Image (cartoon, helix red, strand yellow):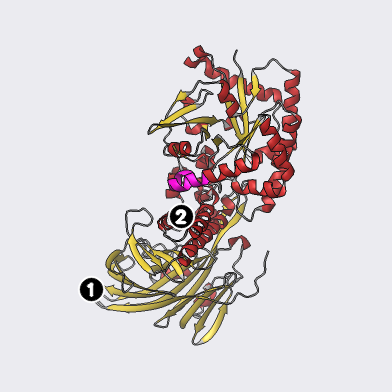
Amino acid sequence: MNSIYVCFSIKSVSYSLESSKILEEDYQTVYKPIVKFLYNNPSFEFSLSFSGLQLSYFKNRKKELITILKEMIERKQLEVLGGGYYGPILPLIFPVDRNGQIDMLSAELRQTLGKRPRGITLFADCWDASLVNNLQTCGVEYTFLDSQIIGSDKQKFLPIIMTDLGKSVEIFPSYENLAPEKDESAKDFITKIVKAVEKVEKKDKYLQMQPSRVVTINLSHSTMKELNSVKWFEKLASYLKENTDTRIIFSTPDNYRKINTTKIPGYISCGMNHRIAEGTELSIFGSKGKELKALNAYDFMQIYNPSHSLYNRIMYVSMLVNQSKVDKMRKKAAREKLWEAQNGLGLLCTNKSIFNNSKYRQKAFKNLMDAEKILREGSAFKETITAFDYDGDGLFEYVCRMQNYFAYISLIGGSILDLEPIKNSGNYADNLNRIIEWDGQEDDYGRGIFVDFLFSNEQFDSYISGEVPKEGVFSKIHYTEVKFNTKKREILLSASAMFMPTKQEVQLTKKYIINSDGMNVQYILKNKSNKTLRAKFAVESNFNNVNFDKEKLSYFIVEVLNKSERMVLDPEVSTQKLNKKNKLNNVDFARIADLENGLSFAYEPNEICSYYYNPITFKRPTTNYSKENIGMTAVSTLIWDVEIESEKETEKNINFTISSIKKRGVEKK
């Protein structure tokens, strides 16, 4: 019988620039043990993959590792794989950025290890047919994909050759179901591999051609740690020395390609790692996630709004960078910040990063703002307000590039869904939604800034008790544009709805007047029914904890002027008790200040109002099913009692200001 070539490789993992502790831990528990084993067993072939930041870390701090890797590459025992330098989800970024990231890592590998990679790994196996052109352009000859993405009729333990628009690339299916387990003996592992291949060979027409089969197994870092802890590969090598009659030969994909030319023609449109596709939604959405299965990265973006929000921002900054006419050095610096922001950890919740996804997402927003600042400094910046389909939902959004911040306003709810001051802070409108299974409540509206509600007294009592507003009227409604004036920087929106408690038709006109330091928001609420409207009109703003890893909001300052008396509120406690005692019913100024980043968000209503504050912590399950904090939001709401006669209206006005303040002593972890 022909041989079965087994190709072990280690999956590439993305890191952020602050990951030196994780890099060191991975070196000690993943790479050092396997490299030591390989060096002592020169007949055992293996493949390794590194992200750009990981390679840079090893190059600067582990020079002895680089020396050993070079030696094993020269004797063709080891193959090092390429990919995107910052671990991007390649299908989700522009072709120019795909090519740039792949070429950047390939150049670094060639310079560091002396050989250009022929194969690459993809973040979370995210694939799209359009990548074929990019891979061939970058000199990449093959890649790996989760076998679950590939149809069962093509899972023949042979590489697949895919052609798109006249260009082709080889794809090696990766069989996670055949990966060794910590307690699995070498004999059982070999038997498992042989049985799987023989089962396919019995029904396979390719048997007549007698090709040598290949079983590619990409191992995660967590799996490698477990295998290394019990010296599993050493046990495997010992077993093979005593049992030389097996069909198994250990190889690298490139070495296998040199002796085998049989490939299966096939076309794979798109997909992603099945474990992430099946498991992430359940962790994020609870049982509802079973109905929201992500089949690919595009589906995931539609399912998980926070990631989609970051993706929209990445696309926008990519456009700015690619169209920029600044000098080459600035453009290069801006592009590198953009590439760093494209790190897949911010866009896609994987099993490792789901609990810290907010942190990675905020890091990406910071890098994108740094890229934009570099472009602004390199040219005469002009404040602009533009209207176009920013987020791909088929509706216009209003994008505000102002001197001191970036923001965009959505017609859904008429609220701000992205607010980024021009500082190294993050996106304060990057809020999560509560899920009943994890948070005890189920938010059914987008937690933006300037979200509008109309409550009855009973509904308001439930709202200040922390319950989800079920009949907020305007929080989920689709506003329509009445007027948009770029010169005056005015956006006039309107919405009509039914106030269900009394079945009265109401109309809300909402005008944003944008300025360099914030905006003025004018409301006109009109009673279109034939009887007097009595209700509470509330404007809610949600401020994300952009430093959520601190797991508390104690570096926030929440203060109001109530009857001209300054009141400092506890940022960790809801004002429910104060509201029920009517202690916050005469407010003419409210402010949330982020001491960590030195930013203040101030509200000045034109009329005395009530004020409600509520901190929300979002929890999700960890890998051992206990819950951890993954994000926090500070809810800040202005409320007015309204009594409007039939066909009459009332006007409310809020001046919103973003300003820098002096950073004060904030305890660092």
The residue sitting at 38% across, 71% down in the picture is: 456
Above or below 238: residue 424: below
Residue 204 horizontal/vertical position (percent):
49, 16
> Magenta stretch: residue 150 in it?
no
Residue 324 seen in this snapshot: yes
Residue 19 horizontal/vertical position (percent):
65, 53
SS category of the residue bearing label 1: loop
Q: CA distance from mark 2 to mark 1?
A: 49 Å
Residue 502 horizontal/vertical position (percent):
31, 69
Above or below 647: residue 498: above
Looking at the rendered structure, the kind of residue marked 1 is Asn
Circle 2 or circle 1, nearest the eye: 2
- The C terminus lies in quadrant: bottom right
Q: Mark 2 highlights which residue?
A: 314
Residue 435 horizontal/vertical position (percent):
50, 54
Task: Out of 114 and 343, give the one closest to the viewer.
Answer: 114
- Label 1 neighbour load within 10 Å: few <14, some 14-19, many 20+: few
Above or below 327: residue 27: above
Looking at the rendered structure, the kind of residue marked 2 is Ile
> Magenta stretch: residue 95 in it?
yes
What range of the chain is rendered magenta?
A: 90-102
Residue 151 seen in this snapshot: no
**Which mark, residue 530?**
1
Task: Out of 654 and 408, give the one closest to the viewer.
Answer: 408
Main secondary structure of the magenta stretch? helix
- Looking at marks 2 and 1 on the same chain, the residue that comes earlier in the sequence is marked by 2
SS category of the residue bearing label 2: helix
